[in-house]
Amino acid sequence: MKLRPWTFDKDKEVVLKWIGDAKITDEQWRIRTGFEVNNRIEILEFPIAALPLLKVGTFYKDGEILESSTTGIIYDVKIPKLNHCKIVNALDACKDVGHYLYANPELMSQVVFEFTVEGKTYYLPQFEFIRAVFAVNRLTTNAMMQPNGLELLVENLRLINQQAYLELAEEIPNNIVKDENFIRYFAWLYFSPEIKASFESIYMLLTLKQSKKEYLKLEVKLPEIDNTYIQFRGIQKGNKVLILQWLGSDMEGTTFTDIEVKHKAFKKKIPALGKRKYRKSFKQDAIENILNDNPTERSKQDANQQVQDLQSTQFQFKNLANVHKVYGDNHEVNQGDIYISNQGQGGGIQKQQQEMGLDVSIYGGKIQPIDFKTLEVTKDIRGQGLEKFIKMIQLLAQDTHKYQVAMSFVYLPLGRKFSFLADGTRRICCLVYIQNKLTSKELYVFEVATIDGKTLSTLIVDFTIKKNKEFHISKIIKELVLNSGSWKTKDLSKSNFKRLKHLKQDLYEWKIRLESNLQ
């Protein structure tokens, strides 16, 4: 998905510096977003449901997010009481860590939570909590900006002891409701009083100011939850830490063991004697999704709308509820001979680009809607065995006079068994960018989660071709999956690379050994 409007050169990489105010244009909520370009801030406006795509400290090119190009590195913290915090403005939070907002009044005045834990001060932008915890897709993001938005998504429900029942509204797209992670998340969101109250506080706080101002800050009331573990990408300077991206948390689990869910998408398949239709598609003419930037053009209703897979926000529930589908109508499935068809959506030669909408779908709309899959519900979010590697990189990053370091998580692409751990969790690659300030040399370090006992060395790559690094990074990770969890040295031979074996060493010894391979 490419964001539009996009006022920058299509080949220029720009970083998302901060999120600004929300406003209503043509009866649709929009979010103002600050990008840094040439040492200044430029504000662009997008539909509010673009929030899952808007990650502070991440680079973008031609409107497309570059998930492997970020600022900051990965940290974690356990907050004793989540709602025990101060409220400060973004100027005070950002200046302490050198995250410059270039004197932009709108960005500097955004509200930030301040926590103090074990002598360190952590700054969490309110918009980032909203983005990561509640704006998980188009559906929930638009719902949080409406009165009783959550209630509009439910037809019937009940919670009896450890059994939850949900009958979801027809407006929820089929491809969203078929995702068990979304069902677990939605049940948690609806049946947890603290979480639901926090979700509903977003619209309530907006309406308190709506009649007085055109531009409104996104604010939220934090839930009263104890001992919340958070994993995040951020910037640290001394004892001050700015959270740029909330990656995951164990924020209050669920009490129910089973969820029964009913939706029109769940139909019992009945064998029939008719011929089976096979629809040809042409991958070389794949559609490129472009965000519709005209607020007057509305999205149409489409139960089978496209769902795009994005880098996940992780939610840790120690009790992973079993999801049981309640079937309604029957659906006949032909079992006869196959015939070829190029007719219909997905068949024949496709257009190169298609405008996609993120607004609330309406009857009579013309724009094709799209939604996102950004959730991973798991029993453990603590790094997949990468904790020691992350702490070693944190040590390296402390040598600020020598190194500039950025670190992010990249999920392995789907397609092979190696894409997942044994428990079904999507396997993670920890990607580290290191620039030696003394030599200006740039290197990328790939460390893949191998908590399941897979033997795989650390990969260090110096790209001899500096253009399209995002493409080459994605290709390396994709080839790793296709090669069943082994680095494909044939393709790597086009770059300078080294492999670093894992040894039993403490953090300092590991750091020194890595540094010796960064020359």
Image: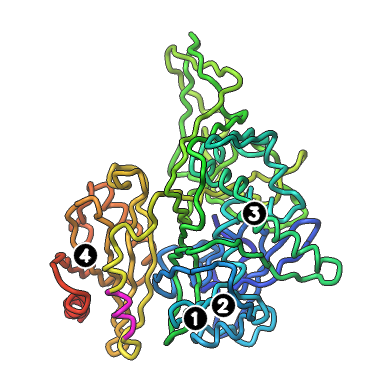
Q: Position of residue 188 (x, y in %)?
A: 56, 47
The first of marks 3 and 4 along the sequence is 3
The first of marks 1 and 3 along the sequence is 1
Secondary structure mostly taken by the magenta-highlighted segment of the chain: helix
Residues at circles 4 and 1 in contact by the CB criterion of under 8 Å: no
As shown in the figure, which amino acid type bears the numbered disc 4? Answer: Thr
Task: Tell me the SS state at disc 4.
Answer: strand
Circle 4 is placed at which residue position? 458
Which mark, residue 121? 1
Circle 2 is placed at which residue position? 114
Residue 6 location, quadrant: bottom right
- Tell whether position 395 is magenta: yes
Q: Residues within 10 Å of mark 1 (few under 14, many from 20)?
A: some
Residues at circles 2 and 1 in contact by the CB criterion of under 8 Å: yes
Q: Between marks 1 and 3, how big is the CA–CA gap?
A: 29 Å
Circle 3 is placed at which residue position? 141
For discs 2 and 4, the disc positioned in front in the rendered view: 2
Q: Position of residue 103 (x, y in %)?
A: 64, 87
From this viewpoint, is residue 421 visible? yes
Q: Position of residue 457 (x, y in %)?
A: 18, 61
As shown in the figure, which amino acid type bears the numbered disc 3? Answer: Thr
